[in-house]
Image: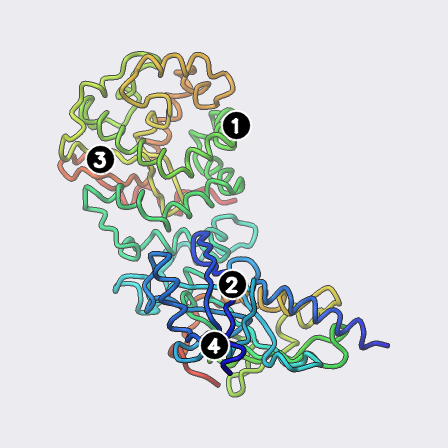
Amino acid sequence: MSSDSSEIQINVKGPSELKLQISIATDKSVLELKQAIADKSDVPADRQRLIYSGRVLKDEDALSVYKIQSSHTIHMVKGAVRNAGSTSGAAPQALPTMQSGQNVHDPLTQLNGHQGYGLMAGLNPFADMGLNPNDPNMMQGMMNNPQFLQQMSSVMSNPQVLDQLIASNPQLQAMGPQVREVFQSERFRQMMSNPDTLRMMLQMSSMMNGGAGAGAGAGAFPAPGLPSTAQNANPNTPGAGASAALGVAPGAGLGLGGGFPMFNPFMLPPSAGAAGAGAGAGGANPMAEMMNNPALMADLMSAFGGGGVYSLTGGPSHPSTQIHPTSLSLQNIPKW
Amino acid sequence: MARVPRNFRLLEELEKGEKGIGDGSCSYGLEDGDDIMMSHWNGTIIGPGHTVHENRIYSLKIVCGELYPDAPPLVQFISRVNLPFVNQTEGTVDPAKLPVLAHWTRNSSIETILVEIRREMGSFNNRKLPQPPEGTVF
């Protein structure tokens, strides 16, 4: 036994692209390997579950039991990651209306279904993700929640869903192809799937609302290139009715809230001048194009802000930006 | 004569399994590394997210007969699971009820079976089926 207790190099693949290389002797136990992994990652040993060649490794076994060889790969899965509320094993509840609308050709069905588009499942019971819609910090929480971000990004990268979104909203539909172009542009999707951008938009959103009131409409949005009132606004204004940059609609799947202007990446403080330059020069930038078209912008914002989108808002002190859970339900969506 | 392609194929699959495929949501390998005929395999499936199977690890046994890959392998769940194509007393997968086995082709592999079963777990009809306690076996 001692003669074959040689040192081997194992690749460990874990969640979110985690990859580790670990050198360990084969007479070490699985638990010792887990500890070595814990040292190199932020996953404590007792949360790790290791899988190699179709087998779950048992803590007390020596690595030699599994005949792991150098350069082989072990998969690490995090166990019991979720908070108490969701570990009950109960099925995530979908809206009853979703269930009646089963149709394989309907992207919303897919949304509610498998393959990672479990948007409804993940978002609908907010408690599942430890989110409290009444919490002013909720949007921040969501932005920091990898689960949410991943869902956002898979939703935004599914053209079918976008088509559906547009088709389900007459106002968006009326706007013609520009909206589609914007939505379907890589640039837009990148922005939508970039946690930092989203966070930034959120911050901007609350700043803007602090200065310009809770109005989610076009009025709150300064013309492109003009110095933004955001710079004067107190970013820490509490309960400013920060209309969420993203609205989550249990019917349409996903909408953009009143904070839409914040999508302009060029409006990063402190330089408003850069915003103007960016919008002017960025011919290739779909957002800039959109910003240059005030009519489209206004349309878009009223469609998003006022179009009955279930807007997740953070400011309980502003009734006008409270959540309207019933404002857009499936019944309002035309049959397709 | 027929053995050569069979073993060649299985060797290929073995190597792929040891290197680890994808994100580890499906994994497989020989039950016993000394099994020269490479007949008996283990497989694991990590239950797809946002389903009742989330965070569960299911273990399976796969037996590749002499006719593999012309004929599909036998597939049996070790971990208890409630799925329409799994026999509830033995855990065997009914080949007639799982399309990847019912319409078997030489291009299918152990990996494709596991991936397909995992996909079935996330299908609309199966994602919410009540499941036996985690960790129980057939």
Cβ atoms at labels 4 and 1 below 8 Å apart: no
Q: Amino acid at mark 2?
A: Gln
The residue that disc 2 covers is: A9
Could you say which quadrant of the image residue B100 lies in? Answer: bottom right
Q: Are marks 3 and 1 on the same chain?
A: yes
Please, which chain is the residue tagged with disc 1 on? Answer: A
Query: Residue B17 location, x and y as percent?
Result: 60, 66
Q: Residue A321: which numbered mark, if any?
A: 3
Q: CA distance from mark 3 to mark 1?
A: 29 Å
Q: Is A180 situated above or below B136?
A: above
Q: Amino acid at mark 1?
A: Glu
| Mark 1 and mark 2: Cα distance apart in space | 49 Å
Give the spatial CA distance, label 4 vs label 2: 38 Å
Q: Nearer the viewer, mark 3 or mark 1?
A: 1
Residue B42 image position (x, y, % from top left): 57, 76
Q: Position of residue A33 (x, y in %)?
A: 41, 68
Amino acid identity at mark 3 = Thr
| Marks 4 and 1, how far apart at CA | 45 Å
User: Quick one: which residue is furthest to the right in this view?
Assistant: B1
Q: Secondary structure at mark 4?
A: loop
Which numbered disc flags the more N-terminal residue, 3 or 1?
Answer: 1
Q: Which residue, given by chain and number where applicable, does mark 4 sit on? A: B82
> Which residue bears the numbered disc 1?
A181
